[in-house]
Image (cartoon, helix red, strand yellow):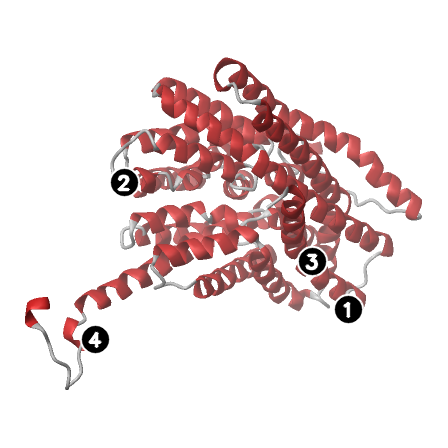
Amino acid sequence: MNSKSLLLEKLRESAASVLPIVSIVAVLCLIWVPLETDLMLAFVIGAVFLVAGMGLFSLGVDLSMTQIGSHIGAKLTKSRNVPLILSVSFLLGVAVTMAEPDLQVLAKNVPDIDTTVLVLVVSVGVGLFLMLSMVRILRGIPLRWLLVVFYGLVFLLALLSEPDFMSVAFDSGGVTTGPMTVPFIMALGVGVASIRSDSRAQEDSFGLVGLCSIGPILAVLILGFIYRSTPEDNDLRVLASYADTVALGRSYLSAIPENLREVGMALLPIVVFFLLFQVVSLRLKRMPLLRIFVGLLLTTGGLMLFLTGVNVGFSALGFRLGERLADPKWRFLLIPLSMLMGWFIINAEPAVQVLNKQVEELSAGAVSAKAMGLSLSIAVSCAMGLSMFRALNGISVLWIVVPGYLIALVLSFFVPNTFTAIAFDSGGVASGPLTAAFMLPFATGTVSALGGNIMTDAFGLVALVAMMPLITVQIMGVIYVISSRRSAVRPEAEAAYGDTDVIELWEM
């Protein structure tokens, strides 16, 4: 497939992700819930920026981040130098996470924590757990026991932590497994797994993303013990209004340089690290190197367009819509509308289709891609409904995530290891860019209008969405196990012969 076809395919995928939400919001706002015209126009323009940005970004990541991860992973494999593998994994984990678009969006929506502080803390958490993931691959440590130990530590710290940091911590684990981080980590893991020659090496390359999502949760929970917000940090956002179309256009144009600067600063560590690796060790030829730099340019441009669309138009309308629907006149729409948007968000995610096919192949057809897709849609729809129920009633996120993760961890002992690894890897698949860019501001606006605590009642939405696949994929694994056992105990003669068949005993 040539570059033009790839770009068109990526744009089609991003449009399929964004347009369902745009359609639902348009119908709602044009028929029932009145919103400011300028805000609606800003939202439409923001949607165009999102489609273009996500398409360019996805293509750029395929050409750059995935290739960088593969090349560095292969070179580290050849070195067989464990301290080098661990130190490079940490540095790359930090650098790649800092440029994750979902994390950038989440950090700007958190009122009580400085954006730079949150991004750095979360990135260090990913880097440390990427090191741990490399140790697991090299030593063949069972994934389920690491999950049990570290989630036990997570829940212990959560019980002792500040409530304002708890929901943000769980959301941080969901947003770090996004379109920038996942391809890079997976490529790095497959390369390092090739050091081992046993039959379980390839199986152990799964689960990296699931483990890396624990690091940010622990890091933010620990941050809550030492970080103190200032009173001015708690001011709610002031939504911009535009006198005319020129003012709106200038708002977008003025946001582009600032977002470009932020994106450049976020990507700079990756570029510097790659160039150093290229000079010292990789020494790629001209064409592969040129392809990577083109990918980095596309990644930069796409991420800049994405953040501009989110910050100026998309998130603002989500916040305002949440405010308006909190009115007693419309409040009955909040939960069903959230569930409807959750259903379409998960259905439109391209990575979900890949996950569904992966499970179908893994189960040898016992769990179909269609059944997997339906179960994920139901699960994410329920997660959105639960999140809005929390926003309306102020229920702590722990009352949902603790039972949810306990169920997921218990299921891990009854399904094949690969199902568990894929399940914990797939949390980032469900919590895609639109969850942080629209649904989180939507919940924030609702809680703000109700006079609730944004930090405890609105945040946690991403965490619930990321938690559901852990349960759903493993339930499908249980179905596969049951189906396999039934096939194994079925008498051989049942399927083979009729009453008039001649049975050649020496051929049996």
Place of residue 482 in the rendered image (x, y in percent of width and height, measured from the top left): 27, 64
Q: Residue 19 got which mark?
A: 3
Front in this rendered view, residue 395 or 104? 104
Residue positioned 79% across, 69% down in the render:
31
For residue 386, side relative to residue 129 (left or right): right
The amino acid on which the numbered mark 1 sits, given as a three-letter code, is Trp
Amino acid type at image mark 2: Arg
Mark 2 vs 1, N-terminal side: 1
Asked whether the viewer can see residue 223, the reply is no
Viewer-side residue, 121 vs 159: 121
- Which dot marks residue 495? 4
Considering depth in this image, is 69 or 466 the residue closer to the camera?
69
Q: Secondary structure at mark 4?
A: helix
Which mark, by number, is residue 200?
A: 2
Q: Nearer the viewer, mark 4 or mark 1?
A: 4
Residue at the (30%, 37%) spot, across then down: 201
| Whole-number angstrom distance, CA of label 2 to CA of label 1 | 56 Å
Q: In this rendering, which labeled residue sits more in front, label 3 or label 4?
A: 4
Image coords of residue 37 (percent x, y): 86, 56
Classify mark 1: helix, strand or loop. Answer: loop
- Give the residue type that dot 3 points to: Leu
Q: Are marks 2 and 1 in contact (CB under 8 Å)?
A: no
Report the side of 482 relative to 454 (left or right). Answer: left
User: In the rendered image of this protein, does residue 412 appear above or below residue 65?
Assistant: below
Disc nearer the start of the sequence (3/4): 3
- The residue at 60%/50% (across/down) is 435
Check disc 1 and report the residue beneath it. 32
